[in-house]
Image (cartoon, rainbow, N blue to C red):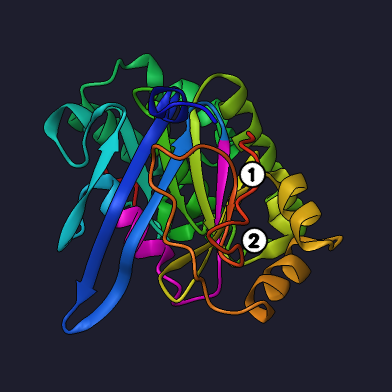
Amino acid sequence: MSNSADATAGAAVIVDDLHVKRGSTAVLEGLSLAVPAGAIVGLLGPSGSGKTTLMRSIVGVQVVQSGSIEVLGLPAGTAPLRTRVAYVTQQASVYDDLTVRQNLVYFRRVLGAPASDVDRVIERTDLGTVADRLVGSLSGGQRGRVSLAAALLGEPELLVLDEPTVGLDPVLRVQLWDLFRSLADDGRTLLVSSHVMDEAKRCDRLLLMRDGELLADDTVEGLLAFTGTDDVETAFLRLIERGAPDLAPRAPDRPGPRHAAEGPDEAPEPGSEATR
C-alpha cells in the first residue's frame, strides 16, 4: 500500500468529502476522488448524476456545503487559477455577433494572453476556414470548437470540458477526441464529462457516477476486469446490479482503483463558454 504522499503525487485535482446541495436536495454527498495530471479522465454517468455540479465545484463557480477541493495545488476557485484552468460549458459561451477571430481576440485580451495565441488556437482547433465568419452563422459543432479554442488561450494546465461532443456527428467526435489526446500528450490534464459510454475507451482513467455517488474510479481495463464485461456500458450496469455502495468514497490518501460494489474487506490491491 502506498503512503498518502504517493497517492496524491501528480494529482491535478483532489476532491475530499465534497457535499453539495441544490435547495434541500443533496446533489453530491461525501464525494472523494483524485484526477491525475497529464491524463484524460472521463467523467461518465447518466444525465442528472451530478457530473456538471462536480465540474462547477472544481472550477470554483459552485457553492459547496462542505469538503475541500484542491486544484493544481491551490484551493478551487482562487485567483491564481484563473489562467491555469479553463472550463468549457455544455452551451457555447461565445458571442454570436462577433467573428471567430474577434471572439478569440476579445478573450485573449481578457486573459492577458499573447497576441500570437489567436492564430495558434485557430490552427489547433481547425477553425482557419471559418475564422472570419460570424459565430452565429456556424454549426453547433463549429461553435463548440470556438469555445474550445477560447479555452486554449494562454495554454491552461487543466481543461474541464462538460459534454463537449454532444450533438456532434461521428467524424467530428473522432476529430475532437484526437485533439484531446494531443493536448494530453503535451502535458495538459483533461476532465471530460459524457453520458456516451463508448467514449470511455479514449480515456486514461474513468470516474463513473450515478445519483451523486462515485460508482467506480479505475482504468478502462481495470473496470472491465473487475466486472467481467467487455464494454463500459455493460460494466456500468453490472455495478448497479451489484447493489448500492457499502464502501465510503475513497479519500485522496487511499491509492488504487475503487468500485462501489466492493465491500470493506474486498478492496483490490493498489493500482494504479470558455470560462476562467
Q: Secondary structure at mark 1?
A: helix
Which quadrant is the C terminus positioned in? Answer: top left
Bounds of the magenta span?
40-56
- The residue singled out by tag 2 in the image is 168
Give the amino acid at mark 1.
Answer: Leu
Q: From the image, which quarter does the N terminus lie in?
A: top right
- Left or right: residue 118 versus residue 65 is right
Q: Residues within 10 Å of mark 1 (few under 14, many from 20)?
A: some
- Residue 196 position, x and y percent, is 66, 65
Q: Does the magenta-highlighted stretch encompass residue 43?
A: yes
Could one spot residue 132 in this view of the protein?
A: no
Residue drawn at x 29%, y 55% as measured from the top left: 17
Asked if the stretch drawn in magenta spans residue 188, the answer is: no
| Residue 133 shows in this picture | yes
* Left or right of residue 141: residue 91: left
Q: Amino acid at mark 2?
A: Leu
Q: Position of residue 234 (x, y in %)?
A: 77, 70
Point out which mark residue 176 bears.
1
